[in-house]
Amino acid sequence: MDDLVKCLEALGTPRVTLVGDFMLDRYVYGEADRISPEAPVPVLRAVRGDSRPGGAGSVAAAVIALGGHAACIGVIGADPPGDELKNMLVAGGADTSSLVRPNGSATIVKSRYVGMAQHKNAQQLLRVDSEAGYVVSDDARLTLRAAVRSGLSQCDVLAIQDHNKGLLTDSSTREMIQDAVSAGVPVVIDPAQAADYRRYRGATLLTPNRFEAARATGIDIVDDETLDRAAAQARLAAEAQAVLVTLDREGMYLRTSAGPGRRIATRPRAVYDVTGAGDVVLAMMALGVGGGLETATAAALANVAGGLEVERFGVVPVRREEVLDEMHRMIGLRGGKMLSRGALGQKVARRRERGETIVMTNGCFDLLHMGHVRYLQQARELGSCLIVAINSDDSARRLKGPSRPIIDQRERAEMLGALECVDYVTVFDEDTPIPLLELLRPDVLVKGGTTDTVVGRDLVEGYGGRVMTLDKVEGLSTTQIIDRIVGRNG
């Protein structure tokens, strides 16, 4: 995981030429707390709506959010939905100069109706697809192939998302792949739900999900053995270097030409909505492969990014910073949350740019106990990032006496980092946290109710921050615990 963090931090800005079916996703949200008297269906009382790039547009948004550059190649209608889609892509930073808009072709629109009971628990009730007017002429295909050839000279990877809407035919897809291979550009493909992967011959990598891999190979995936056979057969059919099968909450399975397949496990997650997960996986794989990473390394990064996406409702692009933060959380039990002062300053600056509220507390936290845990949980509720600054062993001795601390600073930091409510831990050797406060300038400084004096109050309130004192948990303190141990054992 440490190596993955370094790889992602050094990835740069890979250039992705993206070909696919660009669509407009619309969402209508409303209250759905009663059944229609006309039919046994929910009544949706619409309260708001929004639109997002869909299909290959969702991949473009994901590429940009993950730190890449996306040049979009496809067909959209010369209609208001097409205008809306193109404007969103441009606003997000995508290159849309190669989106063809022929007269007579309508933009594909997917409208999702989402019900909420008591303003929470969003649940998709119905999806309506409008694609009858989507037409791709032979002239449009010639224009698109010329755009692909031009784009290959300026990109690091060709990404193809195939929704089987008519844009990508057997012949046009093979021609694009051949052009990329001739130009020395890798090709990453999210395949259509098709029974034949020969359309994708020569691709570098395919990223089907479990259902798509099963349909393409005719193998019912029920265990590791059938999963491996399906992945191997899909790779052979496409004559691809690798196939990455996505498995929702079970992670991924990578099968390459080099040898046996391997599972890429994920941490347990609450899968809220799988919509968009495949788009994020394709985007991360394109950036990884285009950025020169080994396929297995790119797949491990895509596994983390896709895992974050399924925890959200709808298609919400995952940012590179979020993937990095997630990996830091995943290595937290091995001390990954413990940061030097300089590294912590960079993390705080990045979170503040995203509008997050930074909370900081400080103390010795010797002999971690339930009073500490409750206090830290309450402190985390005051913002979106909790920093715990602990006194070094030398600082604690000066403050508490020569017999303290009982637990050394490394172990104290690791135990605190194991708490989910704690985002970062740092150690200070000064007698007070003033230098840290001057550097980090937290929005909220929190102190437990064990003292009437809050060191740093004037500084924090002086720049507009807040100082909060939380109630002490009676009967729970390190000193009291030590006294009980001594009293019982002499």
Image (cartoon, rainbow, N blue to C red):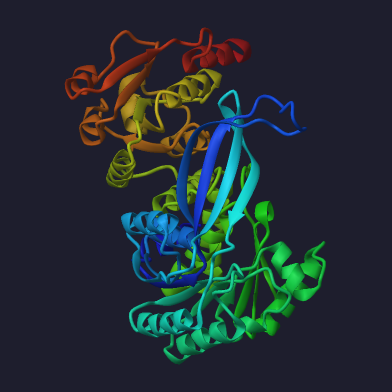
Task: Please indicate whether residue 215 sits to the left or right of residue 88 in the image.
Answer: right
Return the x and y of residue 225 as percentages of the image width and height: 81, 69
Quadrant where the C terminus sits is top right
In this view, the residue farthest toward the bottom is: 182
Residue 201 appears in the picture as rendered: yes
Return the x and y of residue 117 as percentages of the image width and height: 62, 26
Q: Nearer the viewer, residue 216 or 101?
A: 101
Q: Is residue 9 above or below residue 234?
A: above
Return the x and y of residue 202 as percentages of the image width and height: 58, 86
Seen at 24% across and 30% down, the residue is 437
Q: Nearer the viewer, residue 484 or 118?
A: 118
- Number of on-image labels: 0
Q: Is residue 147 above or below residue 433?
A: below
Return the x and y of residue 113 as percentages of the image width and height: 59, 41
Task: Please indicate whether residue 449 sits to the left or right of residue 214 in the image.
Answer: left
The image quarter in which residue 62 lies:
bottom left
Task: Please indicate whether residue 469 sits to the left or right of residue 182 in the image.
Answer: left
The image quarter in which residue 380 lies:
top left
Residue 274 appears in the picture as rendered: no
In this view, the residue farthest toward the front is: 104
Q: Is residue 53 above or below residue 443?
A: below
Q: Nearer the viewer, residue 184 or 178?
A: 178
